Image (cartoon, helix red, strand yellow):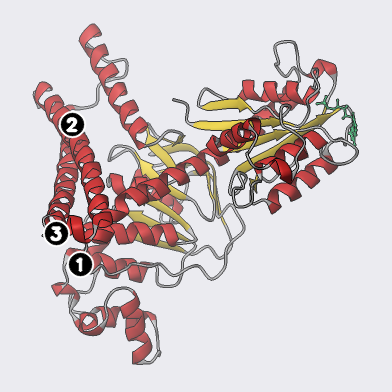
Amino acid sequence: MPDVNIAVVVGSNRRASINRKLASALAKLADRKLAVNFVRIDDLPMYSQDLEVPLPASVARLKAEIERADAVLFVTPEHNRSIPAVLKNAIDWAARPHGRNSWAAKPAAIIGASPGTIGTAVAQQHLRQVLGNLGALVMGGEAYIAYKPELIDDADVITDAGTRSFLQAFVDRFKAKASKARQAQSRVKMLEKMRPVAALVREEVREISFPAPEKMLSPPIIAVDNVSVGYDPARPVLRRVTLRIDNDDRIALLGANGNGKSTLVKLLADRLKPFSGTITRAEKLAIAYFAQHQLDELNEDASPYDHIRKLMGEAPEAKVRARAGAIGFSGKAADTKAGSLSGGEKARLLLGLATFYGPNMIILDEPTNHLDIDSRAALAEAINEFPGAVIMVSHDRYLIEACADRLWVVADGAVTSFEGDLDEYRRDVLSARSRADADVARNGKADKPERPKVEKRGSLKQRIANAEAEIARISEIIAKIDTALALPDIFTRDPKQAAQLSMARANAATALERAEEEWLEASSQFDEAGL
Ligand SMILES: Cc1cc2nc3c(=O)[nH]c(=O)nc-3n(C[C@H](O)[C@H](O)[C@H](O)COP(=O)(O)O)c2cc1C
């Protein structure tokens, strides 16, 4: 199935429309991960409120197609310095009936062609305003195409190299926007699915919250251009890294251990300088960094109160205690020595200290290793509510699915954006592995030199350990749900909660099956390899 569904609305019903031709040429520039659907607007009646009940079939279809799409591309001419009536008619219809606006929060982009050089600029301004009022999220930047018949050939291919590369960049940017929206949507669904587990079974969960940055910075907050970085200039760990991070990004770094995730994190956190290339940070960018190994760096003899006091100078005790309470250490808990805190409590304390001043970006390196299930859910909610950027390195599938809207793969010395979801990533990794294994079986050697045995052993062991941790985590969830479901009369007393719990149990059981499959597969590879 393709990743992202784009609805294309052409603002012209003319048979030989140059805008329809441009739209077809744009569809050709999209890769196979984009499914493009041309939405009909020529069969809509002229809008009148009298026609709203019952909704005409063509309108219901239009609304369904817009709502199903991850984003909408408008390709429109200009008519008398505004948008064509046929397009305005379609926009009005899809915004109706009252309370059922199909454009709300829909990512959109606008482009248009006209024979004149400045054509469509005014129409695009009007369209931007109309869509903005309706709550659509219109992509920035401007794209006016001065159309000459020879610009697009009979096969709908753009003949001019300059225009083609401009339009390719436009399509790529739009695709990134649309797939981000899709990821965000599946994140919401994931949270909805998981929330019953955390919210229904917990006795009392302490919240986690990250203070918002004082000021939002102008994007990008970090731009990395052609950077090589590592520990030995003769053998950089990562090469030719080019990427950008924006204010509200939620990025998960994927890739086997030892491939350079930590190196990338250190580069972003300004703990490693590039050997070549440039890295530009927004002025006054404040970064919070949390890594599991820092747990050992806490002063064992100092309490949470002492740790926070250090950050608050001369502030009165009540204020320090209020901050301690805000990060989960109210009352006596604030005076417990760090040495006596559990792993999870230490992690909460460190998260609170690292983000104390309201950073613009938070880097979390395996943040959930010491957290129990409820604290993981609390962390996921805190990440989702935080208005700044978050970079996560984590083996915790739940955390990534609940929080990340971009996946970056760090492998073979490079950082690449992965367009699919976690399941697709896992399938890709597994099929690449079995292809490599098949090559070994056929040729007696792999296309690439085989990795040293000890490393292969390490990565398989890591997979097995991760799967085991996942199995333990999900089993714990199932046990909690079962305890809640075993309460006498829960089904009569609170049928809604009982139904939610049953659903959560079914989801958890599916997740458990998946983790067990992964464990079996990694274990059998480990055995077969005679390691
Ligand atoms: C009613 C009408 C009004 C037009 N007004 C404008 C205009 O304001 N600005 C402009 O650049 N072109 C204008 N044009 C010319 C169009 O750009 C040209 O007809 C173009 O081919 C329309 O796009 P289409 O082929 O996709 O229908 C107008 C054309 C019509 C029929």
What label does residue 203 carry, if any? Answer: 1
How far across and down, in percent of the image, does residue 19 sit? 77, 26
User: Alpha-carbon neighbours of circle 1 within 10 Å: few (<14), some, or many (≥20)?
Assistant: few
Q: Residue under label 3, please give it.
A: 489
How far across and down, in percent of the image, does residue 466 sit? 19, 42
- Identify the amino acid type marked 2: Glu
> Can residue 5 be seen here?
yes
Residue at position x 48%, y 68% from top?
Answer: 212
> Can residue 235 be seen here?
no
How far across and down, in percent of the image, does residue 147 sit? 83, 25
Towards the viewer: 37 or 320:
37
Distance between the Cα atoms at labels 2 and 1? 32 Å
How far across and down, in percent of the image, does residue 102 sit? 60, 44
Towards the viewer: 378 or 486:
486
**Which residue is farthest bottom?**
316
Residue at position x 22%, y 63% from top?
Answer: 202
SS for tag 2? helix
- Identify the amino acid type marked 3: Asp
Quadrant where the C terminus is found in the figure: top left
Which mark lies nearer to you, 3 or 1?
3
Picture layout, residue 494 above or below residue 73: below
Tell me which numbered mark, 3 or 2, is placed earlier along the sequence.
Answer: 3
